[in-house]
Image (cartoon, rainbow, N blue to C red):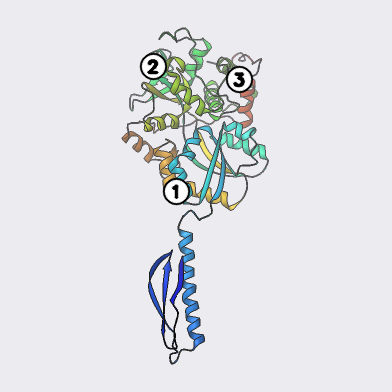
Amino acid sequence: MFTFQSVYPAARPGARSQNRFMVDGVDTGPGVVDSAPRAGLSGAMRLLILVLVWDVFLAIGVWHDRLSPGPHRPQVAIKIAVGSEDRGLFEDPQAQKDFKTHGYKVTVSPFGSFAIAEQTDLSTYGLVLPSSTTATDALKARVHKQLSDEQLFTSPLVALTWKPLLPQLQTLGIATQSTTDGLWHFDVGAYLRASAQAKKWETPAGLSGHQVLLETTDPELSNSGAMFVGSAASDIDKGAVANTPGQIACAAGVLAPVLNAQGQQKSTTDQLFETYETGGLTGKPLVLSYESEFVGAALAGTLPEDAVMMYLDPEVGSDHSLVALSDNDDARAFTSFLKNDETFQRIMEHTYGFRPLGALHDDFADYMNAHGVPVATDLAPVPTPRLKDLKEIIKDATSPTPPAPPSGCGAP
């Protein structure tokens, strides 16, 4: 701020009083105000000039305060319920510093996306970030009011395994390697056929004799588990979007043994990925995750040796949308900030491996390839069942008395 300080008061008529200008507490030197009357300038006129000069200094100081993100600037509190895999991004120290610089105090709470949409008490949250448009639709159906949402980023579903297990998965037709880019793919149909036949691992010791199972999150709570059901339903119904009673019954009947054989499932994808990292080849031989979890760990140098990522076939999308629970300026401004702030976008992509939406999308693969983390560029997500139909498939497949696949349905 600019201040004006009289240092030497006039001692006699006609003397010159010395004054000093202060800018943010720093003395910028003397100014001189003549206390003697001058011809043509009345006392009132001189006073008016001084007032105008002071107003200019004051205005400049106000703008200085507004443009400087110092500690005296009030912080806008933003509280977000996020999918578990998004927690690290918003709690990242550099992201937190960026938020504070722009006047935001951001706190997040992690949940499964369908837990956010259908179970979590959201009364204290201003924004939510589910991990798919389907979970966003579930949220909108719950609150029974029009909500605005903006897609921030996306991350495809992947299956994670280990290099020594690839030959067995190839023999079963589950794992295939592209001849063009060398990336691995997970054939959902082949996996369902192997599961129906209760195929078992042959090696190594500690894993041999156990059923080949893709461990997923609880589809009633977590988006990744629900989206795997959507991918499987697409394969079971031969590419059709399950929406008839017969298609829904078929998908539920085929998926029931696949889901129920897992026993207790994790409620969030982040929890499942952590157990993959620590459990190793014999503890977690095959798990479902997001590309961003694997890529983020690879960029950070924490990915375990021999870890392998396989893209699902058929692939399903997972677009993360920020949903404002109330129509207020702070929520709209923060959403716009996230979509346009280069620092946040860079952290999101280059540290946590999320795919940006919009103009920056084409740069994602180039950056990852340059850093030794090759990723797919030709993903074509299939449509998943409508929310109502997806929930019915999940409910029937996970019930205590799940149905058997109807005769003649598209079961593998």
Of residues 204 and 98, the one drawn nearer to the viewer in this rendering: 98
Q: CA distance from mark 2 to mark 3?
A: 28 Å
Q: Position of residue 208 (x, y in %)?
A: 44, 8
Query: Which of the two labelled residues, at mark 2 and mark 3, occupies the earlier sequence position?
Result: 2
**What residue sits 57% from the left and 33% below the top?**
113
In the figure, residue 107 lies in which quadrant?
A: top right
Residue tagged 2? 166
Q: Position of residue 129 (x, y in %)?
A: 55, 39
Relative horizontal placement of residue 341, taking residue 370 as reference (left or right): right
Relative horizontal placement of residue 13, taking residue 368 as reference (left or right): right
Disc marking residue 341: 1
Vertical relation: 181 (above or below) 69: above
Image mark count: 3
The 10 Å Cα crowd at callout 2, few under 14, some 14 to 19, many 20 or more, is: some
Q: Amino acid at mark 1?
A: Asp
Of residues 289 and 120, the one drawn nearer to the viewer in this rendering: 120
Disc marking residue 187: none
Q: Amino acid at mark 3?
A: Ala
In the figure, residue 348 lies in which quadrant?
A: top left
The 10 Å Cα crowd at callout 3, few under 14, some 14 to 19, many 20 or more, is: many
Q: Amino acid at mark 2?
A: Leu
Tag in front: 2 or 3: 2
Q: Position of residue 210 (x, y in %)?
A: 48, 9
Residue tagged 3? 252
Of residues 406 and 140, the one drawn nearer to the viewer in this rendering: 140
Q: CA distance from mark 3 to mark 1?
A: 43 Å
Image marks 1 and 2: residues in contact by CB distance under 8 Å: no
**What residue sits 50% from the left and 82% below the top?**
47
Extreme residue in the front direction: 11
